[in-house]
């Protein structure tokens, strides 16, 4: 297959597809939902472009790759960032060795031309200007206009698209006119224990069974406590633990000690006590914190100008007065003549 195509007299150099062979383990229902989005039930029907929502490291990209492989299509991945420009998404001009301008098609445009699957990874990190350039592609028009190359690119009938989005705050808010084109929303949750163990075994078939179970127990406990540790975190902890244990054959670390060191190195010391970390997170979210007044935003609690501080002072004064009265009563009793 040629890596150069010509559209309206402009030569486009195409990108290469992703060759990752990923197996989707567990959560069969969400895979079937994604495949249903890409079905076409009539010649007049159009595929959907869903968004895959979930925590980082939960397997959103793996799911989309596995779905593309199951359909027998080439898979292309475009990594979205905060500084992605419309020309980055579509066609980028590059100065060739002979001094002429060469136009390079992005992974998205290559998938459009070849009829492949494009995964816009972490799409909610992209700004609105870049999303606006995709509006006609994501509705019934199914084309994109490259201002840089001066061409309009029509999507192949077999072209499919999905957008992954992380559930965190370090992202842009996607405008409603784009969200209405990215439907439906497919949500990924953490895998069950058996599925998570199978995932770890798939990626690390050489890991010992005891350390695999130790990692799965940690992950399942963190999922139950609503913490952010993912299966990807577990894989990294396992990899580093095994490397540390095998580093010095003459003085090897015990596997459980190597695993504990790896856990702290990869996820931080707070990961050593999940219950305490969960309680801290609840407090940070306001679960165990007293409600704040307006004055708390402008004054420290001990500031004499704090509007609520006077109430505390008055209470202290009242207590002092009560104490003085008590001592006065004692003095009066001392002044009275004793009766014998």
Image (cartoon, helix red, strand yellow):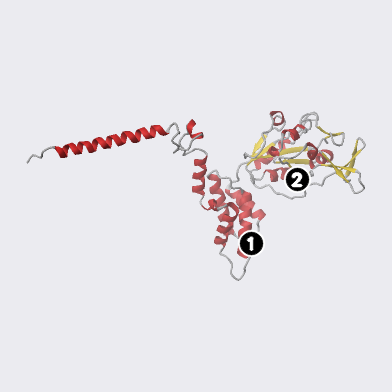
Report the quarter where the C terminus lies. top left
Q: Is 115 placed left or right of 297 in the picture?
A: right
**Mark identifier at residue 290:** none
Of helix, strand and loop, which one carries label 2? Answer: helix
Q: Report the number of numbered marks.
A: 2
Badge 1: residue crowd in 10 Å (few <14, some 14–19, many ≥20): few
Q: Residue at x 56, y 64 (%)?
A: 254
User: In the rendered structure, which disc, 1 or 2, sits on the residue that comes first in sequence?
Assistant: 2
Question: Which residue sits furthest bottom?
Answer: 250
Q: Which residue is drawn at 33% across and 34% down?
A: 317
Q: Is 38 placed left or right of 309 in the picture?
A: right
The image quarter containing residue 15 is top right
Give the labeled residue for mark 2. 69
Q: Which of 147 and 119 is in front in this view?
A: 147
Give the labeled residue for mark 1. 243
Q: Which residue is drawn at 50% across and 44% down?
A: 280
Q: Nearer the viewer, residue 127 or 54?
A: 127
Q: Is residue 63 above or below residue 138?
A: below
The x, y position of residue 25, in whole percent, is 66, 48
Q: Is residue 297 above or below residue 22?
A: above
The image quarter containing residue 215 is bottom right
The x, y position of residue 10, in whole percent, is 91, 38
């Amino acid at each position: 297959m040629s890596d150069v195509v010509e559209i309206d007299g402009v030569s486009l150099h195409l990108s290469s597809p992703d060759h990752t062979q990923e197996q989707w383990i567990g959560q069969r229902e969400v895979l079937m939902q994604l495949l249903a989005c890409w079905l076409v039930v009539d010649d007049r029907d159009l595929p959907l472009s869903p968004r895959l929502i979930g925590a980082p490291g939960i397997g959103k990209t793996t799911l989309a790759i596995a779905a593309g492989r199951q359909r027998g299509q080439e898979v292309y991945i475009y990594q979205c960032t905060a500084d992605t420009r419309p020309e980055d998404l579509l066609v980028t001009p590059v100065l060739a060795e002979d001094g002429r301008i060469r136009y390079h098609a992005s992974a998205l445009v290559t998938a459009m031309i070849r009829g492949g699957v494009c995964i816009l990874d972490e799409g909610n990190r992209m700004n609105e200007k870049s999303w606006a350039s995709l509006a006609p592609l994501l509705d019934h028009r199914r084309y994109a206009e490259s201002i840089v190359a001066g061409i309009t690119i029509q999507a192949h009938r077999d072209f499919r698209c999905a957008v992954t989005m992380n559930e965190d705050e370090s992202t842009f808010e996607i405008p409603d006119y784009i969200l209405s084109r990215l439907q439906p929303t497919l949500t990924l949750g953490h895998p069950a224990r058996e599925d998570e163990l199978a995932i770890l075994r798939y990626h690390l078939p050489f890991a010992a069974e005891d350390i695999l179970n130790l990692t799965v127990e940690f992950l399942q406990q963190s999922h139950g406590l609503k913490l952010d540790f993912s299966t990807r975190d577990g894989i990294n902890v396992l990899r580093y633990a095994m490397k540390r244990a095998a580093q010095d054959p003459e003085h090897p670390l015990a596997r459980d000690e190597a695993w504990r060191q790896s856990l702290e190195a990869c996820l931080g010391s707070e990961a050593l006590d999940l219950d305490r970390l969960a309680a801290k997170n609840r407090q940070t979210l306001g679960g165990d914190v007293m409600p704040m007044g307006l004055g708390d935003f402008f004054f420290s609690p001990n500031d004499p100008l704090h509007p609520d501080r006077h109430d505390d002072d008055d209470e202290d004064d009242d207590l002092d007065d009560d104490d003085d009265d008590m001592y006065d009563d004692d003095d009066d009793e001392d002044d009275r003549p004793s009766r014998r």
